[in-house]
Image (spheres, grey):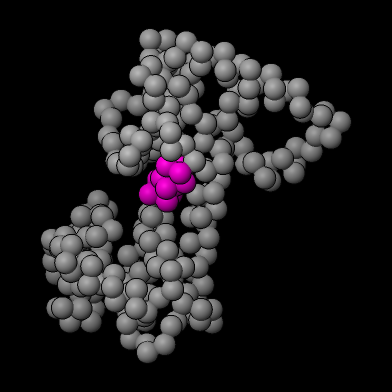
Amino acid sequence: MVHFVYDGSFEGLLTAVFDVYEGKAERAQLFSIKTYQPDVFAERRDVLTDSVKANRVWKGLFRKLSPQGLLNVYSVYLSERTDRETLLLAFFRRVFAESVSIEDDFSSPLIVQISQISRQIHREKHRFEAFVRFIHLKGNIYFASIEPDFNILPLIGPHFAERYADQRWIIYDTRRQYGLYYDLQQVQEVYFEAVPDSSVLDLPSDQVEEDEALMQQLWQVYFQSVNIGERKNMKLHRKHLPIRYWKYLTEKKI
């Protein structure tokens, strides 16, 4: 058994796949350096991320898969599951071995699992696109911190860049300790040593615009005024708005 250990990046993963095929390693496993545990019974090969190799693998997948199939591959990578490399390598082997598309072969447990994971990721993506709430910081920057179950920042960046194209903003993932910063031109990754909570109440007053607390209060009053108590259905409410997302919503901080 040969263990291919890559740097944890998507480009590194694709490079590792290239190395598996180039080395004709029939018995191979892929591991991120962040989670790798040495095995005395396996040979370790460290993968040097190579954009040329990664692009060759991606172009090969592009010829074999639909846009949705490619998105499924990237979604499984973003899932951060402990078995994501095993699933993807098995999937790649099938893709490159078959002369026809295999992505709709739902008689295969592997294909079903890949599809299910992708749906989970995109359900999380859509919820955070709806539930992210920004606070207005000094310097005219809008800030939000999130803690999603999956690494969805790469997926939600384009949505917020389009929706808030005229505002500078930062969305920071406190679990993974990195964020996205939009400077009115492009979205780029950012890293902070210390990250405040998304609530204005937990931020020093000298960091928050003076009208932010008032705007939050006005939104809460509006939310209360349009709420019809007689029609309240908390079971249905929690179904469409799970409790774990409430901490992001200004209207829930009443």
Q: For this view, does 231 lie left or right of residue 148?
A: right
Task: Work out which quarter of the rendered image holds the C terminus and state it.
Answer: top right
Residue at the extreme right of the image, as rendered: 230
Residue 75: give x, y in percent of width and height: 42, 59
Q: Considering only vertical position in the picture, is 11 above or below 18?
A: above
- Please state if 217 lies on the left or on the right of 232 as rendered: left
Relative to 167, is 58 above or below? below
**Figure check: 235 above or below 36:** above
Q: Main secondary structure of the magenta part?
A: helix
Q: Quadrant of the N terminus?
A: bottom left
Camera-side residue of 211 and 122:
211
Residue at left offset 54%, top offset 82%: 107
The magenta stretch spans which residues? 147-162
Horizontal and vertical percent for residue 182?
Answer: 35, 37
Residue 54 shows up from this direction: yes
Q: Residue at x 75, y 37 (%)?
A: 234
Q: Residue at x 14, y 78 (%)?
A: 23
**Residue at image point 38% right, 31% down:** 168
Counting from the top left corner in percent of width and height, residue 70 is at 40, 68
Which of 184 and 182 lies nearest the eye of the viewer?
Answer: 184
Q: Is residue 179 visible?
A: no
Q: Position of residue 3 (x, y in %)?
A: 20, 68
The quadrant in which residue 193 appears is: top left
Residue sitting farthest toward the bottom: 99
- 233 on left or right of 211: right
Q: Is residue 108 magenta?
A: no
Which picture quadrant has residue 58? bottom left
- Which of these two is toward me, 229 or 29? 229
